[in-house]
Amino acid sequence: MDALRSYFYPPLCVCFVLLTLHTSLGNAFIKCKENERQALLSLKQGFLDYYGNLSSWGNAEHQADCCKWDGVSCSNRTGHVVKLDLKSYELGGTIYPSLSELRHLNYLDLSFNFFYNLTEFPICIASLTHLKFLDLSRAYVQGNIPDQLGGLSRLVHLNLANNRLFGRIPPQLGNLSSLQFLDLRENFFVGMVPPTLQNLSMLKSIGLGYSPFYNSSLTSDLNWVSPLASLNTLRLVNLNLSDAKNWLKHVSNLTHLQELVISSCGLIDSEPWPSLSNNINSSSLTTIYLPLNSLTSFKTLLPWLLSHKDSIVQLGLPYNNLKGPIPKVFGNFSSLEELNLQGNQLEGEIPQSLLERCTLRFLTLGLNSLSGKLEDIIQGFSGCANKSLEALSLSSNQIVGSVPDLSQFSFLEILQISENRLNGTISMGIGQLSNLEVLTLDSNSLHGVITESHFLRLSKLNTLDLSYNALVFNVGQNWVPPFQLDIILLASCKLGPTFPTWLQAQKKYFMLDLSNNQISGTLPDLQLQLFDHDLSGIDLSDNLLEGAAPSYLAVKVSVLHLSNNKFTDANLLLCPNMATKLVVLDISNNQFSGALPDCWSNFGSLLFLNVSYNSFSGKIPISLGFLRQVQSLHLSNNRFMGEIPLSLSNCKELRIFDVAQNNLVGLIPNWMGDELNKLLVLSLRSNQFSGVLPYTICHLFHVQILDLSLNNISGRMPKCLNNLTALAAQTSSDALIKYYLYEIRAYAFILDSASLIWKGKESKYSSTLGLLRSIDLSSNMLIGEIPSELMDLVGLVSLNISRNMFSGEIPGTIGQLKSLDFLDLSRNRLSGKIPSELSQIDRLGVMDLSYNNLSGEIPRGTQLQSFNASTYMGNEELCGDPLPKCPTEQTGDDGDSEHDEKFFDGGFFISLSAGFSIGFWGVCSLIFFKQSWRYAYFKFLNDAYDKLYVMVAINMAKFRRWKRGSTLTQRTLKLIKRSLLKHMWLEASVSTIQEVLNMKVSTISLAIEFLTPRLYHRIYWLPFLEVSIIRRLLHGSINEAEFVFCLQRILDCQAPRYKIIPSERSDNQGHACLIRVI
């Protein structure tokens, strides 16, 4: 072997040296192709090179070789451009078709650029048939993915994520047989995920999903997933998977899967799969993250999770609807390092087996209903667990106790136990956590004194939140903290009475909340370098700060709250010498006075401005029109005068415009309905606006609260109010009106509020402002009838048009306002009856119809009768509960007589005469001309006469017989009366019995009359005697003794069919009984 090596080794070395020399010499003379060089220069012309990153591309002599240009790589053998990597070059503009000239390109990366001018996907890319790598992620590319892209058969890596692509995902992508990486997340695709993706047999990683903050229009049933046998990473974000009922089965077939992320996809509990554990390679899956879905139970998940219990490192199921206790088996996951179950509905205590898991590093269980004592939880981390734990988050649960000594958790970096029921003190041992970076214990009931010892070794601390407790800071005036904080949240911590000096030593914080701390005096002159972060927030509200608001706060701060203090001078703050980055500015409820500075051209980024409850005077500054991005403008409760400036028509993004309680005059601007048509709340209450309501007010399609009360508005109410579509719909909306502050932080927002007159009382609404639907036009001079179109606003919760001069009747369609809770029509000139439909509004809690000219009876219904009499007072002709009863002669009788008078008019008598004449002469003509009818008619008259004669004769004979037996009948009636009085304690009317005996029926019913304490009749009917008995008595065929005997048998309960019992309706004297058939 050594001989062979010595024989072949020298020649091989010589060959290698020669080959290397040849390659080096060849490369020295190989340059890029001229046509490709020109293509690159043309491509540069389409780019907008903001920062000169393509300065090496040019026509100069030293720039002749394009292979040496930045981002360009060429083949060592051919000199063709094979790689173009311009990632994060911050380029703009567009992509010219000259890119297709780079025919040998196999690597193209244009990600993280700004091609805003691209209106369509660059089709030229589809002609680059040698491409193996294509990355356009975060390049702001828009349009449809061309079908031709599926022809790039050599493509291995395709990343189009985070763009503005729309339309359907082309099924031709399933032809990319070499593809191993595919990412299409955060776009605007619609329709179904093409099933052809199952053909990508080489695929190892795939990411799909819709753009965040939007409802996904991209759906899938995940049937295409199972055939992807090589897949190791599956990421699905904001994809509609509500139809994927067997998602667990499809995912479990991926035997090489290592990472599974399905976020915000509407994932539901999978249907049970009995053979689940038999089809799984339990050694591959390490990461499972399924947040923001609709999972409700561990029942179907646990068998699948248990089959991976030795491989799972990260398990996240946050923000689902999981219920019940935390499964104890999680403590058996031997490799588990991170467990995130935040934002569910879990209850009970944390299992001891989980606390003893030695591998556990991150435990996040916030936003649940977990219970237990904090001391027991900390003690449960035994031995190795407290040596490995890096993050413990238990915020927003029901944990009690105090904060114990945590000094044994030497690796702890994050401790979050805010919004619980902690009620003790904070141990000084927390100051020994030298690795602690985040400490949040806010919103508990902790008490005691915070000293320097609590922060002794916290040199890495960057976030501190102890807000909303009963803690008292007691640190030395010269204390210098060992940390430099990024976030300081100490609201309601009793830091006063002076501004804490130790805070002035903090050099880099970008969020500060010292609200409600009773801090007085002037604000210290904090140095500008303290605010190195351009995006920051400061809240000093609800203190006793005074003097001038400093200007530096407006320069570097994005969110500034100075409300509820005693500041007196705003000129420095509102007139900085440079453009500000303020997004939120709240200086309400201070002691500012004088004219509002006219310097708003420097506040172009402002979204929220509140200067209400001060003493600003003069006209509203014209420069407020420069606030083109402003969405909420609060100027109420000041002393502004003059008209609303036309410049405010530039504020087209306004959602809330509140100028209530000022001295503004003039007409309500016509442009307001057209230019500010995104308004949700418009409040012009308590000013001196005059003139008529402009019809353009009906163009406020989104308005939910319209308050124009306490002005001098006249004329009629526009009939187009039913165009206010937000009030004409009963669809539910978000209870909050909030504005997202994307410039500051993702998902950050500010919650808006407004002061409104609700049910006669001024209140401030914040958390429920978005649910209110109100129109208030009260205390003006509006005339005419209430337009029926107003009743089409079925979403109204409050309607107040009181103290005007409306006339006519209340529209009968008012019953359509089913959501109405408050209704005030008082002090107008309304007449007529109250519509019965008003009683159909079952949600009505407050109503006032007083001081009108309403008449008639108040419609009966539990709703209208539940209000007190003051609701209806001042309507003299109104009656009925709860007012005095209406007169006995019903208004309906007058209506009937009036109807009768209208019925018997001249036309009626003319019609009657004509009808009688036609009928009479018609019959006579028939009898005269038709012989058979004439004979039948006279025969009928003869027969009728004969029957009448016989009937009169028979009745006369009966009358004579009755007259002869009247004496016997009178004696019988007296006997019946005595019997009734004896046995029933009732007084029977002789005339009634006489009337009964005269009835010609098969049975006789006896009417027994008596009076109750309320003096109205009650009549009980008793069938008890057959007519034949009385007839025999009257004809003498039965004697009186036999009749009396029969009657007494019946009344003495001896007859088998009758029984006399006391009545349940007897009065206090017992004058009632009841005879029942048994």
Image: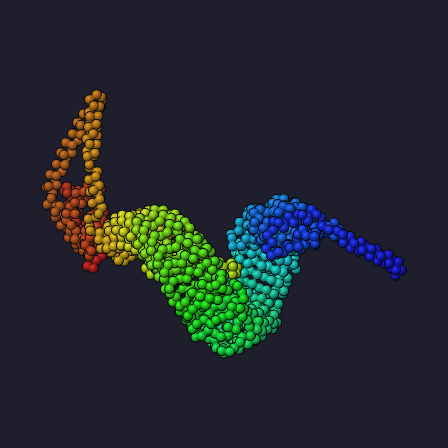
Q: 474 or 646, which lies in front?
A: 646
**Residue 867 coordinates in the image, percent (x, y):** 29, 57
Q: 1026 or 533, which lies in front?
A: 533
**Residue 563 coordinates in the image, percent (x, y):** 42, 66
Say above or below: 583 vs 1041: below
Q: In the figure, is residue 733 to the left or right of 1027?
A: right
Q: 1064 or 955, which lies in front?
A: 1064
Q: Which residue is at the far front? A: 61
**Residue 417 coordinates in the image, percent (x, y):** 51, 69
Q: How many dots with numbers?
A: 0
Say above or below: 198 vs 932: below
Residue at horizontal 16%, vertical 53%? 987
Colouring: rainbow
Residue at horizontal 43%, vertical 75%? 497
Kindly tell me whether residue 405 is visible in this rendering: no
Kindly tell me whether residue 803 is visible in this rendering: yes
Q: In the figure, is residue 481 to the left or right of 805?
A: right
**Residue 956 coordinates in the image, percent (x, y):** 12, 36
Q: Quadrant of the N terminus?
A: bottom right
Quadrant for residue 146, please give it: top right
Q: In the figure, is residue 832 to the left or right of 455?
A: left
Residue at horizontal 54%, vertical 53%? 211
Residue at horizontal 69%, vertical 48%? 36
Q: 32 or 907, which lies in front?
A: 32
